[in-house]
Image: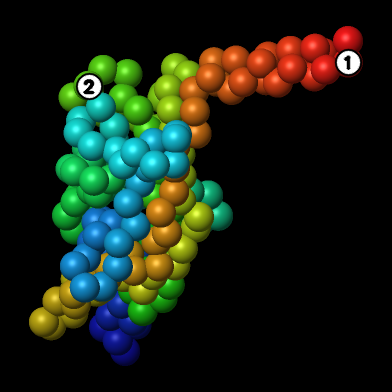
Amino acid sequence: MKKILLMAALVACIGAMAQGTVNFKNNVAGSFSAPVFNADGVTRLTGNAYYAQLYANIGGSFQPVGTATPFLANGYVNGGTVTIDAAGVVGGVVTLQMRAWEASTAGTAGTYEAAIGAGKKYGFSETFTVTPGNPNSNPPGTPADLATLKSFSLIPEPSTIALGLIGAAALLLRRRS
């Protein structure tokens, strides 16, 4: 009887902190394409001056998962398979968000939060949900694609916004006189 209770407790613990996997890429040929754009809304991010990372809603707040990944070409990233460790992930749905930012120094990712603090350009997707693959099944489940991810643009650095507001105010004042 004790062995049965011990096995049940072990299975419950494994289920409580389960892992699920997703493919961290925003372009799958023939399936979906969600490029990330610069603040102008036209130019696609390219190269190691810009980075992206997935954030998962874990316990009610968004946490970074996987590693920061530089952009390839045409606004796309390929960060490989990302494992999400959280209760309810296997067999459940997880809410994700892709965040992107301008690096302080090209080739050095830093973090999304540091980029905002340094006044760099940053942006984020709408939240979306996926059902992650189960890496512990036999055979292992296929990592889920981010098929419901939508394109987004970076937000201009604060100085650009400030200059725009000053210009708009000057036009309004000139119009009054």
Asked whether 50 or 167 is in front, the reply is 167
Q: Which mark is residue 106?
A: 2
Q: Position of residue 96 (x, y in %)?
A: 42, 58
State the count of labels: 2
Q: Please tell me in which quadrant of the rendered image residue 147 appears.
A: bottom left
Q: Which residue is mark 1?
A: 176
Under circle 1, the secondary element is helix
Q: What residue appears at the point 28 percent right and 80 percent down from the top-left corner?
A: 7
Distance Cα–Cα, label 2 vs label 1: 45 Å
**Nearer to us: label 2 or label 1:** 1
Q: Amino acid at mark 2?
A: Ala
Q: Residues within 10 Å of mark 2 (few under 14, many from 20)?
A: some
Q: Are marks 2 and 1 in contact (CB under 8 Å)?
A: no
Q: Quadrant of residue 42?
A: top left
Q: Earlier in the sequence, mark 2 or mark 1?
A: 2
- Asked if residue 60 lies left or right of residue 26, the reply is right
With respect to residue 174, does 132 lie above or below? below
Q: Nearer the viewer, residue 98 or 157?
A: 157
- Is there any visible trace of residue 130 in the rendered image? yes
Residue 19 at least partly seen: no
Q: Residue at x 49, y 23 (%)?
A: 157
| Residue 94 drawn at (x, y percent) | 43, 66
Q: Identify which amino acid the numbered label 1 is placed on.
A: Arg
